[in-house]
Image (spheres, rainbow, N blue to C red):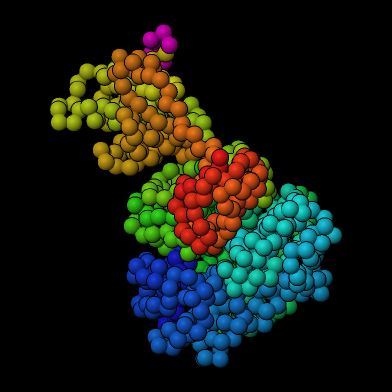
């Protein structure tokens, strides 16, 4: 085994590799860009080397700088994580030529399977069923349109060297190809240094199910069952689970055998993933192979007990697999939620900024479920425009799928982030949805269930009770500060959005009782709030209401509080009954008119904005392209108009809600 390895990556995967290396007694070396100088991974590593500016092309994609750092540090091997250089055969060969072990598959396997175009050619030659498409070089937009119309819409445009949803576009029309193909090429070039894009038929209502494989340098290859990755947005996986709720034992066995056969054909000798599209009849088609560790690998580790990073290191060191196929089982169920820096209320656009507050749930065994959180950040760290917007990967493991989902819902409640947009409310909404809980999911799930975008969820009756009890308790504590706590019941009117609930709050042993009045003034129910963990200034309120544990996010606002429980948010005011009567008579404030403004929906770099004063704009027309976190976002006009003013220029950085165009 190695005594020292270099990690050619950043963020949570770098931290993940360091943890396993420590357990095995291996010293670690980090390379980092200027943007990551104060990162958690750099602090955790035994050594660290600065290799360039924030741009990945000048740091994490610079093979020469990484090799130089490995030699200077005396590292015997390089673990590439995922993304960046992890699927570059040229990098694996460079490592070998410099006497450094590449912790990943051999270059021949990467060449055969790592490139999406070449892998499809290889799969066809091996008589593996593949999705219909054009797997040759595409010579421009006109050629792309021709190919798309020969295949038949819808089609998928996908970066050949890509992964993680970068350089991917679905086209339903000719216009989609004309706009999406250049954007896909640009994203591919910026993310992977390779702008080749191929086109294939987009199979509607599919499931995305992948098989984890593991090989050594002695000819052994096994699979570690499947992961269901169908909950996707913009071709980026959001929620994964293992095993799949859809597969039966026969299909699982057939998919595993095919993945192993394909891997053996290229002498695969590390961890890798064979991805399939599965239709409603459980027919499966080879999609691609990722010749690296996957982002979602923790769910496989949780149901098999196998540390995939350790196995990669052992294989790279020349050790034989200490597992056979019969050793691999399925223990319980695991679910992973990807925590992203993005604003789900603004069509999931990227968000950047500082993690003013970052408080993940505690990890460990909670009886009915276990929690694992893979992260590369700490409170105070900054999420920049240069890299992926992932903050953490939250995982739960339980004896059953329903148990893992329930555990995830509670863990998401306990996760607290402030300072930038995040998708915690959205993930909570999915966990609470009956369709997800039933397992009837496809890659179109998010588009179908949130067709009008995500605007949160209306509170269920039990959530209205939580908001009522928490609002009343906080009002009681604030009114009692500096004085002796009141001994008699306190009458309050709790305003929840547009609704009013009259309550009477009384202190009891271990907490408070909140009597909720009905319309006629009689007590309708008594809310028993116990196990209270909150004091003024805390951003989370933990407690038990009628024997149900809960966590609520608390944010002060003018005259009240913003409370969030899972996907439901309410502005809560706690007033005296008289003040509530007066409040109801106040006129409603009209929102500002922004109908003539085209605003940047997120912070980023303006890569396209060619309009000038006097130009005519039509509704639906592209007016600008904003790049953030390696994704290009097309900004369209929502109405016809004439350009009155231009507020930004190409090459400039803009903030969220900054005016790009003003229409007359």
Query: Is residue 108 visible to the viewer in this orientation of the structure?
Result: yes
Query: Is residue 372 visible to the viewer in this orientation of the structure?
Result: no
Vertical placement of residue 309 versus 508, above or below: below
Observer-nearest of 176 and 229: 176
Q: Residue furthest right?
A: 150
Observer-nearest of 247 and 389: 389
Q: Is residue 591 left or right of residue 572?
A: right
Percent position of residue 287, x then y: 72, 63
Observer-nearest of 524 and 451: 451
Q: Residue furthest top?
A: 520
Res. 583 image quadrant: top left
Q: How many marks?
A: 0
Res. 571 image quadrant: top left
User: What residue is at 63 percent from the left and 56 percent from the top?
Assistant: 235
Percent position of residue 282, x then y: 76, 53
Vertical placement of residue 201 versus 139, above or below: above
Res. 108 image quadrant: bottom right
Q: Is residue 480 magenta?
A: no
User: What residue is at 66 percent from the left and 44 percent from the top?
Assistant: 618
Q: Residue furthest front?
A: 614
Q: Which residues are magenta?
A: 519-527
User: What residue is at 68 percent from the left and 73 percent from the top?
Assistant: 115
Vertical placement of residue 190 versus 241, above or below: below
Observer-nearest of 552 and 658: 658
Quarter of the image with the C terminus is top right
Percent position of residue 552, x then y: 39, 38
User: What residue is at 67 percent from the left and 51 percent from the top?
Assistant: 443
Q: Is residue 521 magenta?
A: yes
């Amino acid at each position: 085994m190695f005594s020292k390895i270099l990690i050619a990556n950043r963020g949570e995967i770098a931290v993940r590799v360091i943890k396993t290396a420590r357990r095995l007694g291996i010293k670690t070396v980090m390379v980092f860009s200027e943007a990551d100088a104060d990162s958690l991974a750099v602090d955790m590593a035994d050594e660290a080397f600065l290799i360039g500016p924030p741009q990945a092309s000048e740091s994490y994609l610079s093979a020469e700088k990484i090799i130089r750092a490995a030699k200077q540090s005396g590292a015997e091997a390089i673990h590439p994580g995922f993304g960046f250089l992890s699927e570059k055969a040229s990098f694996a060969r460079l490592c070998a030529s410099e006497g450094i072990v590449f912790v990943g598959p051999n270059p021949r396997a990467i060449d055969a399977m790592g490139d999406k175009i070449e892998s499809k050619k290889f799969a066809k030659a091996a008589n593996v069923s593949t999705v219909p498409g054009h797997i040759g070089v595409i010579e421009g937009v006109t050629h792309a349109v021709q190919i798309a119309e020969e295949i038949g819409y819808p089609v998928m445009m996908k970066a050949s060297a890509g992964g993680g949803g970068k350089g991917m576009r679905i086209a339903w029309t000719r216009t989609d190809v004309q706009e999406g193909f250049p954007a896909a090429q640009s994203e591919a070039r910026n993310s992977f240094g390779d702008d080749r894009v191929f086109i294939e038929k987009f199979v509607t209502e599919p499931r995305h199910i992948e098989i984890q494989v593991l090989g050594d340098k002695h000819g052994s290859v096994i699979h570690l069952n499947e992961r269901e990755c169908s909950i996707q947005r913009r071709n980026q996986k959001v929620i994964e689970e293992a095993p799949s709720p859809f597969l039966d034992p026969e299909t699982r066995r057939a998919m595993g055998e095919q993945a192993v056969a394909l891997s053996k054909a290229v002498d695969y000798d590390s961890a890798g993933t064979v991805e399939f599209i599965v239709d409603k009849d459980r027919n499966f088609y080879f999609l691609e192979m990722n010749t690296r560790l996957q982002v979602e690998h923790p769910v496989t580790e949780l149901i098999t007990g196998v540390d995939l990073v350790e196995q990669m290191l052992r294989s790279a060191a020349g050790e034989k697999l200490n597992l056979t196929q019969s050793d691999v089982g399925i223990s319980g169920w695991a679910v992973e939620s990807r925590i992203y820096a993005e604003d789900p209320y603004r069509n999931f656009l990227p968000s950047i900024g500082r993690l003013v507050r970052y408080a993940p749930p505690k990890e460990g065994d909670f009886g009915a479920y276990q929690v694992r959180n893979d992260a590369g950040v700490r409170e105070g760290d900054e999420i920049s425009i240069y890299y992926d917007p992932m903050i953490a990967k939250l995982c739960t493991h339980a004896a059953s799928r329903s148990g893992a989902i329930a555990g995830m819902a509670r863990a998401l409640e306990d996760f607290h982030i402030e300072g930038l947009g995040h998708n915690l409310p959205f993930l909570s909404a999915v966990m609470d949805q009956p369709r997800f809980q039933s397992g009837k999911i496809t890659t179109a799930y998010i588009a179908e269930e949130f067709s009008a975008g995500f605007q949160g969820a209306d509170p269920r009756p039990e959530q209205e009770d939580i908001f009522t009890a928490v609002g009343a308790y906080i009002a009681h504590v604030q009114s009692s500060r500096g004085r002796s706590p009141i001994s008699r019941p306190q009458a309050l009117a709790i305003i929840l959005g547009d609704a009013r609930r009259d309550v009477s709050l009384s202190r009891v042993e271990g907490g408070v009782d909140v009597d909720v009045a009905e319309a006629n003034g009689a007590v309708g129910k008594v809310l028993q709030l116990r196990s209270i963990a909150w004091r003024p200034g805390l951003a989370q309120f933990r407690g038990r209401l009628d024997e149900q544990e809960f966590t609520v996010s608390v944010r002060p606002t003018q005259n009240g509080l913003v409370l969030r429980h899972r996907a439901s948010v309410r502005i809560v005011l706690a007033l005296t009954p008289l003040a509530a009567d007066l409040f109801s008579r106040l006129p409603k404030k009209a929102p500002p008119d922004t109908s003539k403004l085209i605003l940047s929906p997120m912070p980023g770099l303006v890569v396209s904005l060619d309009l000038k004063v006097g130009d005519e704009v039509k509704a639906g027309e592209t007016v600008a392209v904003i790049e953030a976190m390696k994704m290009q976002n097309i900004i369209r006009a929502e109405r016809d108009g004439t350009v009155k003013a231009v507020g930004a220029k190409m090459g400039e950085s803009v903030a969220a809600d900054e005016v790009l165009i003003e229409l007359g």
